[in-house]
Amino acid sequence: MAYRTDDIFSFSAFDPSKLTESFREFAEKGATQSREAYSRMKAAADETTKTVETTMQSAQAGTVEIGLKAIDAFRSNADLSLSHMEALLGVKSVAELVELQTGFLRRQAEMTVEQAKAMQEATRKLAEEVTKPGKEAAEKVMATFKAA
């Protein structure tokens, strides 16, 4: 097997300008891809920040509403109990006592059911409002994956 030494040691085939040009194209392509990736990541981070802010605002507003409902329920229960105590002070017979106590317990049970329904509805509404921004963001992300 014979090697031609003039081909091995010949640098005339080597063109440094082509190597430099190839390296520059590679570097420019990498820089462009990095800028695009950074831009997408920044947009995603901005969108996530907006989603978290919206979620926190919804949670705060809903928590205040639930707190006000709880205060209203406590106030109503206290008023009913005080009214019942006043009525008990005027009792003249055991039958009247039993009737007052039965009526009080019935009203208390009805009010408790109504308050529970109101609190459940407020909690359901809060849960929907708090999860809505995250759900929308997740649907948006999934749509971009489907499009890609």
Image: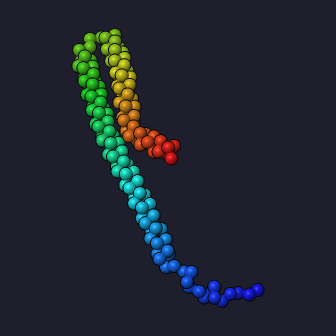
Task: Give the image location of residue 116, x and y in percent.
Answer: 38, 27
Occupied quadrant, residue 8: bottom right
Residue situated in front as seen by the camera: 134 or 84: 134
Task: Give the image location of residue 35, x and y in percent.
Answer: 39, 60
Task: Give the image location of residue 142, x and y in percent.
Answer: 48, 43
Decide: is 122 above or below 148. Answer: above
- What residue lies at 70% left-to-right and 87% top-to-bottom? 3
Occupied quadrant, residue 114: top left
- What residue lies at 38% left-to-right and 40% top-to-bottom? 133
Residue 139 visible somewhere in the drawing: yes
Residue situated in front as seen by the camera: 54 or 72: 54
Occupied quadrant, residue 93: top left
Residue situated in front as seen by the camera: 44 or 31: 31
Q: Residue farthest to the right? A: 1
Residue 94 visible somewhere in the drawing: no
Left or right of 40, for residue 63? left
Residue situated in front as seen by the camera: 53 or 44: 44
Q: State which quarter of the image contains the N terminus.
A: bottom right
- What residue lies at 41% left-to-right and 43% top-to-bottom? 137
Task: Give the image location of residue 96, x and y in percent.
Answer: 31, 11
- What residue lies at 50% left-to-right and 75% top-to-bottom? 19
* Number of dots carrying numbers: 0
